[in-house]
């Protein structure tokens, strides 16, 4: 299970007392193209009923893309969809947050004793422009990403929706939901009658996650002149997509 927690203030001061929203993303079906159940809690509004986020490819794109779609679902409770809610920007007297942060944490099997942080978001308001923000994203296997400035000038502060807009600017530099990523299925190389996956042809996070999973299995990629990061059996990659968490 993934838990996304949203806090008022900077990353260093995040605690349960400044938690303003959270999001649970759990597997309904663990598969290369997975089905999820999503619950969004917003302070003052409570939690949504479990919502379905189906047929989403695993290990094929930034986790912040999954987070953005899950938040959008939680904000569209009357008719659940991944469409970004219409935002009417205010010109004056807008509500704002000086600083906000969010964490993506993984709870294997729901066990809080084994949780690990997979990503963080640090969001700050421009000191001279109320309701104008810049966000910094960090994620395992991904380069640090700093967005450009974007506006979120609203009549009352909605932290989960603000995080959604930060994610959208991380994903495609505008306040629109990008197309869903495709499942990462690279072309293979045949060696001695068997098909192998060239690891360098995988996209992140699979390019980093697959070798780590192989390492835990006690398997090393084999060297090949056309594969600078090595090769692994296609069957192992399929197993990775089905099982790796």
Image (cartoon, rainbow, N blue to C red):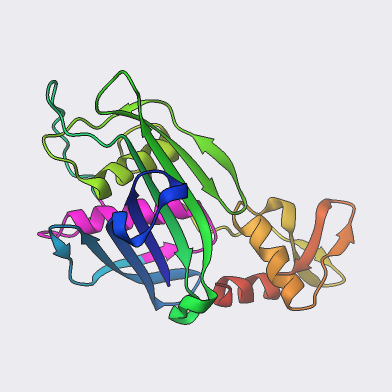
* Displayed quadrant of residue 162: top left
Bounds of the magenta segment: 55-82
* Displayed quadrant of residue 98: top left
Relative to 229, 239 lies left or right: left
Residue closer to the observer: 130 or 200: 130
Residue at the image position 43 percent from the left and 72 percent from the top: 1
* Displayed quadrant of residue 23: bottom left
Relative to 206, 108 lies left or right: left
Residue closer to the observer: 168 or 121: 121
Residue at the image position 23 percent from the left and 62 percent from the top: 41
Q: Is residue 93 above or below residue 233?
A: above
Q: Is residue 4 magenta?
A: no
| Quadrant where the C terminus is found in the figure | bottom right
Q: Is residue 9 above or below residue 107?
A: above
Location of residue 43 in the rendering, given as x and y in whole percent from the top left corner: 19, 57
Location of residue 128 in the rendering, given as x and y in whole percent from the top left corner: 31, 18
Location of residue 233 in the rendering, given as x and y in whole percent from the top left corner: 75, 71
Relative to 54, 83 lies left or right: left
Q: Is residue 63 magenta?
A: yes
Q: Does the image show residue 180?
A: no
Residue at the image position 23 percent from the left and 72 percent from the top: 50
Location of residue 90 in the rendering, given as x and y in whole percent from the top left corner: 13, 26
């Amino acid at each position: 299970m993934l838990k996304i927690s949203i806090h008022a203030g900077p990353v260093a001061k995040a605690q349960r007392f400044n938690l303003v929203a959270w999001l649970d993303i759990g597997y309904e079906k663990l598969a290369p193209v997975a089905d999820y159940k999503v619950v969004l809690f917003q302070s003052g509004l409570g939690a949504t009923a479990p919502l379905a986020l189906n047929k989403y490819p695993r290990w094929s794109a930034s986790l912040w893309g999954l987070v953005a779609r899950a938040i959008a679902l939680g904000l569209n409770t009357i008719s659940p969809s991944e469409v970004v809610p219409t935002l009417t920007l205010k010109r004056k007297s807008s509500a704002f947050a000086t600083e906000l942060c969010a964490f993506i944490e993984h709870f294997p099997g729901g066990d809080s004793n084994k949780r690990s942080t997979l990503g963080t978001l640090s969001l700050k308001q421009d000191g001279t422009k109320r309701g104008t923000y810049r966000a910094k994203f960090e994620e395992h296997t991904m380069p640090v990403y700093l967005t450009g400035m974007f506006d979120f000038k609203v009549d009352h502060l909605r932290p989960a929706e603000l995080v959604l807009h930060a994610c959208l600017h991380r994903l495609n530099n505008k306040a629109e939901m990008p197309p869903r990523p495709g499942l990462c299925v690279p072309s293979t190389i045949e060696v001695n009658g068997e098909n192998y996956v060239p690891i360098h042809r995988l996209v992140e996070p699979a390019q980093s996650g697959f070798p780590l999973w192989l390492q835990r299995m006690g398997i090393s990629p084999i060297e090949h002149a056309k594969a600078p990061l090595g090769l692994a059996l296609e069957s192992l990659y399929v197993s990775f997509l089905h099982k790796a968490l």
